[in-house]
Amino acid sequence: MRAMLLRSTTSLDVNPAPLELAHVDDPVPADDEILIRVSACGVCHTELDEIEGRTPPPALPIIPGHEVIGQVVAAGDLCSRFVIGDRVGVGWIHSSDGSDTENISDAFRATGRDANGGYAELMTVAENYACPIPDVFDDVEAAPLMCAGAVGYRSLRLTGLENGQVLGLTGFGGSGHLVLQLCKYLYPESPVFVFARSDTEQQFAIELGADWSGDTEDRPPEPAHAIIDTTPVWKPVIAALERLRPGGRLVINAIRKEDSDRQLLAGIRYEDHLWLEKELKTVANVTRRDIAEFLPIAADIPLHVATETYPLESANQALLDLRNGDIRGAKVLKIDNKNRS
């Protein structure tokens, strides 16, 4: 099969094409696994964290990708949840211990980091960690739901938001544009304020129903009860803490933060950023429960999933565009399996 391989970690400033298009052996499912023919795989900032060594794979080479949609083409002897031809998705959680806290368990293994992921024509996963996909979404639309959507849903739950309270979103990419719609559906009386780095993102937020949008350091009409940060850097975190009302909560939805502006943390002032019982909470991964609860809600809305597509062999370009460009929705690889038997 064709796959994009990461053979060594590197900065994209040094090597802008870190993934290699290669032909590798087709994976064979174990007794409790299904084999998926991949049709689409979302491109997530966490892939940049893996490639650049902030959350490095434990072994190389590895096939990245953890927003995977495809069809079941084979199953192990112990599998019974799916039949051949079923459409399924796989998220960041590839396997864990099955507990309520499986996202922070030592047993947690990440798709595309600890096990080969979806930047390929085929992949395997334990059947318990694959999810059926609602018919309302096509494959490209469904791919970002597996991480950007599901982890965004978890982030929204962790805010503790009540209907009518103000939510802030800092960063408005693949996850933010889905969380905005989720909030408007689950908490219809809650104003949503969006802090974004570009005019394109700010305007997109207004189009999707944001009540206000502005730059990271702009002042919204009123302080927020909760803010979700989906950015890879620290400046928005510090700005968000200033824009919380007393007792407010900041939820950081990121696997890792970059070091480029870490020095800004030295400027945190207790009285401005942390006092008056403000809270800070981080999101660690995602559970099967998050994905299973989120997908039916996404279908009921139904979520508008904005995407930009690339062929598998252009994965490096997709990663560069994600890192450097304005973001309007999510980036997705379309995998062409026409020549496979």
Image (tube, grey):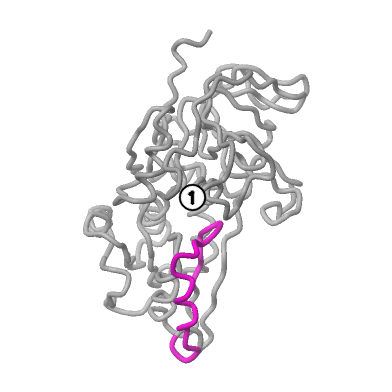
Residue for point 70% across, 48% down: 108
What span is colored magenta in the figure? 250-272
Residue furthest to the front in view is 14
Magenta region includes residue 265: yes
State which quadrant residue 144 falls in. top left
Q: Which residue is mark 1?
A: 11
Image location of residue 39, percent across then percent down = 47, 25
Taking the image as shown, residue 225 lies to the left or right of residue 90, namely left
Quadrant housing the N terminus: top right
State which quadrant residue 90 falls in. top right
Q: Nearer the viewer, residue 127 or 266?
A: 266
Image location of residue 24, percent across then percent down = 60, 21
Magenta region includes residue 95: no
Image location of residue 319, percent across then percent down = 41, 43
Q: Is residue 229 above or below residue 285?
A: below
Residue for point 67% across, 27% down: 81
Q: Is residue 228 visible?
A: no
Q: Amino acid at mark 1?
A: Ser
Please state the total of marks drawn on the protein image.
1
Q: Secondary structure at mark 1?
A: loop
Q: Is residue 71 above or below residue 143?
A: above
Q: Is residue 147 visible?
A: yes
Image location of residue 22, percent across then percent down = 53, 23
Residue furthest to the top in view is 341
Q: Is residue 261 above or below residue 319?
A: below
Q: Is residue 226 above or below residue 293?
A: below
Q: Residues within 10 Å of mark 1 (few under 14, many from 20)?
A: some
